[in-house]
Image (cartoon, rainbow, N blue to C red):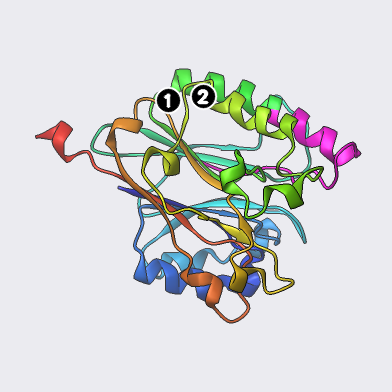
């Protein structure tokens, strides 16, 4: 079973790239962020034509998340139920697997804009609400995966030049602590379960030839519950779409879960 995440930075603009990527990478679930289109504009037919289904939470111009799946999802949850927020940042659905139900969540965490700003405080509050909700979700769904753009580079190794980023959002200690509080629930960063190349990133600014210089950050993550961790056999970053014409500034991250040994 393969689970992937991709901040597509406008599904309207990059729908052909998503469809092409799914044709070449037929994952079981693809979590998308920054749809940047309202619910009624979601291109469901384009996905059903290639054998996929979808659940989504759209928003005009900003935000928006989706989970594109091979099988039908159930018990769909839109946004954090105990946190009043008009921004569309969470969509969750439950999928069948050989091991039973798996809860798959697509998350677009706030950027924070700048340290000390209202948006930064909102980001930290939002992470607290996310943690509280995930604590309850893990009780209901021990097999849980939350994938998305967390807008946090957890450690200096996830930053191309840590000294340059001192004092900026995405790397501040409160943000890293907020990310770490999710791991304290028993979630693990699937990418770091394996030996990886140095300077492995998922986002590069459009400016200053950042992708060409590999001046990026690793801010897109796949977090797996303890019940899923033993079955994760790989987690990789697919940099190829960043070289597309009019690419997203993010690239997909794919985790592979292998249940064969447990079912043998």
Looking at the image, which is closer to me, 83 or 163?
A: 163
Q: Quadrant of residue 160?
A: bottom right
Asked if residue 211 lies left or right of residue 257, the reply is: right
Q: Is residue 81 visible?
A: no
Quadrant of the rendering where the C terminus is positioned: top left
Q: Where residue 55 sits: x, y (%)?
A: 53, 50
Q: Quadrant of residue 204?
A: bottom right
Q: Where residue 113 sits: x, y (%)?
A: 83, 48
Task: Quickly name the residue at label 2.
Answer: 137
Task: Quickly name the residue at label 1.
Answer: 141
Q: Are marks 1 and 2 in contact (CB under 8 Å)?
A: yes
Looking at the image, which is closer to me, 137 or 214?
A: 214
* Kind of element beneath mark 2: helix
Up-down relation of residue 159 to residue 120 (above or below) = below
Residue at position x 62%, y 32% from top?
Answer: 179
Asked if residue 208 lies left or right of residue 104, the reply is: right
In this view, the residue farthest toward the front is 163
Residue at position x 44%, y 40% from top?
Answer: 192
Up-down relation of residue 20 to residue 3 (above or below) = below
Indicate whether residue 123 is drawn in magenta.
Answer: yes
Q: Where residue 39 sits: x, y (%)?
A: 66, 56
In this view, the residue farthest toward the right is 117
Looking at the image, which is closer to me, 150 or 88?
A: 150
CA separation, marks 1 and 2? 6 Å
Residue at position x 66%, y 68% from top?
Answer: 210
- Looking at the rendering, the stretch of residues picked out in magenta corresponds to 105-127
Classed neighbour count for the residue bearing mark 1: other residues with Cα under 10 Å, few (<14), some (14–19), many (≥20): some
Q: Where residue 31 sits: x, y (%)?
A: 51, 51
Classed neighbour count for the residue bearing mark 2: other residues with Cα under 10 Å, few (<14), some (14–19), many (≥20): some
Residue at position x 52%, y 55% from top?
Answer: 199
Indicate whether residue 145 is drawn in magenta.
Answer: no
* Kind of element beneath mark 1: loop
């Amino acid at each position: 079973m393969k689970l992937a995440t991709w901040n597509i930075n406008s599904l309207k603009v990059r729908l052909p790239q998503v469809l092409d990527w799914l044709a070449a990478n037929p994952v079981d679930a693809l979590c998308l962020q920054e749809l940047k289109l309202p619910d009624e504009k979601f291109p469901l037919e384009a996905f059903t034509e290639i054998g996929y289904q979808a659940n989504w939470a759209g928003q005009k111009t900003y935000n928006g998340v989706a989970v594109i799946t091979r099988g039908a999802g159930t018990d769909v949850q839109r946004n954090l139920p105990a946190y009043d927020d008009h921004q569309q940042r969470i969509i969750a659905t439950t999928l069948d697997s050989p091991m039973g139900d798996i809860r798959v969540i697509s998350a677009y965490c706030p950027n924070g804009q700048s340290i000390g700003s209202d948006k930064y405080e909102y980001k930290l509050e939002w992470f607290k609400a996310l943690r509280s909700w995930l604590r309850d979700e893990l009780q209901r769904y021990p097999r849980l995966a939350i994938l998305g753009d967390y807008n946090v580079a957890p450690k200096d190794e996830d930053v191309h030049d840590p000294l340059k980023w001192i004092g900026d959002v995405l790397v501040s200690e409160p943000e890293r602590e907020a990310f770490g509080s999710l791991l304290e629930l028993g979630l693990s960063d699937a990418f770091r379960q394996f030996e990886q190349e140095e300077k492995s990133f998922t986002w590069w600014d459009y400016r200053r030839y950042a992708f060409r210089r590999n001046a990026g950050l690793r801010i897109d993550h796949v977090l797996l519950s303890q019940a899923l961790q033993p079955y994760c056999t790989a987690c990789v970053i697919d940099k190829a779409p960043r070289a597309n014409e009019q690419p997203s500034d993010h690239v997909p991250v794919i985790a592979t879960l292998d249940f064969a040994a447990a079912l043998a």
